[in-house]
Image (spheres, grey):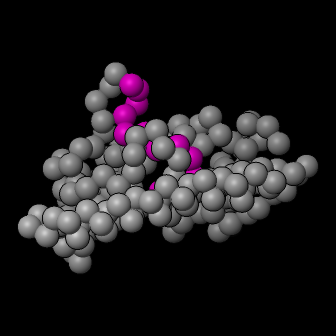
Amino acid sequence: MDFKQIQELIKMINKSNIGEVTVEEKGFRITIKQKEEPVQQLIAAPAMQAQPMIQAVAAPQAATAATTQSASKQKPSESAPSTENLVTIKSPMIGTFYRSSGPDKPPFANVGDDIEPGKVVCIIEAMKLFNEIESEVKGRIVKVLAEDASPVEYDQPLFLVEPS
């Protein structure tokens, strides 16, 4: 399946009532899911390489969680923001997370920035496509949870937002 066919498939899904479609062809599998809002989610990986990719990304996440836990034990005087009333912006797809549109460009969103629904907060590159990820909430960014130019998984938390 070539790039143009994938684009046409996404357009057809967006215009239809279909919630999800999976296409498998010669060791290549693509799944396209549609949310209630007209936003497409593209999850694609060669069928044979999907498992190693997940393992490679899961290991750094576990290391980050362990580091965060040990750091919070070492510094009890520093208070972390309460996550009870925070909204998480999650990755709608597998890909590479970028905070800005280029190396010499400013980040789309920094800690402390006010955001509104529709404001681009990052880019996720998937299959040579750069997808702008927009906020669905109004509020202030409290924490950036993903490293710039790092791989992200579907539904991985990217930002913590204090709603306003």
The structure residue drawn at horizontal position 52% and vertical position 43%, both measured from the top left corner, is: 96
Outermost residue on the top side: it is 104
Q: Position of residue 68 (x, y in %)?
A: 31, 63
Q: In this view, does 151 lie to the left or right of 28?
A: left
Q: Main secondary structure of the magenta part?
A: loop
In the picture, measured across the screen, residue 93 lies left or right of residue 70, that is right
What range is drawn magenta here? 90-103
Residue closest to the far bottom: 84
Q: Is 106 within the magenta?
A: no
The residue depicted at 30 percent of the width and 52 percent of the height is 144
Name the foreground residue: 132 vs 15: 132
Q: In this view, does 69 lie to the left or right of 112?
A: right
Residue 100 covered by magenta stretch: yes
Q: Which residue lies furthest to the right in this view?
A: 26
The x and y percentages for residue 136 are: 35, 59
Residue 71 position by quadrant: bottom left
Dividing the picture into quadrants, the one containing residue 87 is: bottom left
Q: Which residue is drawn at 39% across and 51% down?
A: 146
Which quarter shows the C terminus?
A: bottom left
> In this orientation, does residue 32 appear?
yes
Residue at image coords 35%, 55%: 145
Instruction: Classify 153 as above or below 72.
Output: above
